[in-house]
Amino acid sequence: MLILSEEQIKSLYSMKDAIPDLERALIYYTEGKVLNPHRTVLDFPEKSASALYMPSAMEPVGKAAVKVVTIFPNNPKIGKKTTQGIIILSDTDTGEHVACINASYLTRLRTGAVSGIATKYLARKDASSVAVIGTGAMSGEQLQAVLEVRNVKEILLYNRTKAKAESFIARLTELSPEFTGTIRVMDNPDEAVSKAEIVICSTRSETPVFSGKSLQPGTHINGVGSYLPHMQEVDEETIAKCSKIVADTIEGVKDEAGDLIIPANKGIWSFSQLHGELGELVAGSISGRQETDEITFFKSVGIAYFDLVVAAAVYEKALKAGVGTNVVI
């Protein structure tokens, strides 16, 4: 079994690799070439924490995987990471378990990549300003992916702890050193959103992080932080304003996306109003942006085959490069 650390993965695989790999995977999914049982979530309410177990298999890449990821938001207080994960990769021809791969970076990367893909199809072609609401662990790769698909000239950052937003600038410089536009730290999330054509939300908030009143016509929103039924980053007014809401998977958002479950339970919105899934968007079976002024929303709660695709790609690159540690188990 090949063991790959986060630093080794970073040396092999980037956002430029992940976006096209995931676009192909989305097509495979629409063609029925992916096995993706529903994930199991274990909640630890006293710690505001959870553990997710996510299996999948994909015929075209000849691999199966199980990702185990834990999210413990109090960990920084004891010097540990909030999100920790591993991916066990197996060969579907022999059943051999071929790799154990650190999943923390790959989770951020693949989540960012699918938001980048959604942005490619749903945001205005000329969108040049981005508001980042929440500058935690996931936000860097979210922004990095948007920078890959749009010519961004201004970035507006907001975090409840302003110092964290300010420190994010150094991380952005590391992730996307080619960015030469303006970066501003904002005091108010609604002000940031009102000036943006693309909005990124990646918080663990249980209440909306900006007001739908602040959205300007033509805005595209990526929401990845609300992944449990009681979490809500995006308010009902935002949902009502959206002409197209696209999900990573309809099954996933029905079960886990509080942003959509809460307004549906209130009877002010219905899942029948979903425009469709991201794979359908990439395959061209549903439309992307059609009008300059329409407001669009991509909602992602994550799905296991996203992890499988990037893990399989990293594994192949590692074999060719001779990177990693082989162990006998």
Image (spheres, helix red, strand yellow):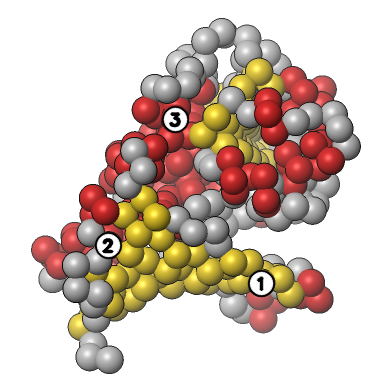
Location of the C terminus (image quadrant)? bottom left
| Mark 2 to mark 1 CA distance (whole Å) | 25 Å
Which element is circle 1 on?
Answer: strand
For residue 128, say whether it is visible: no
Q: Is residue 234 shown left or right of residue 118?
A: right
| Residue kind at label 1, given as amino acid type | Leu
**Residue in the image at 23% along x and 50% along y:** 60
Question: Residue 180, how many percent across, how many down?
Answer: 43, 31
Which element is circle 3 on?
Answer: helix
Q: Give the residue pinned by disc 3.
A: 280
Point out which mark residue 42 bears: 1
**Residue in the image at 49% along x and 59% along y:** 37
Question: Residue 267, how many percent across, how many down?
Answer: 86, 32
Q: Give the residue pinned by disc 2.
A: 63
| Mark 2 to mark 3 CA distance (whole Å) | 23 Å
Label 3: few (<14), some (14–19) or many (≥20) C-alpha neighbours in 10 Å: many
> To which quarter of the image does residue 120 belong?
top left
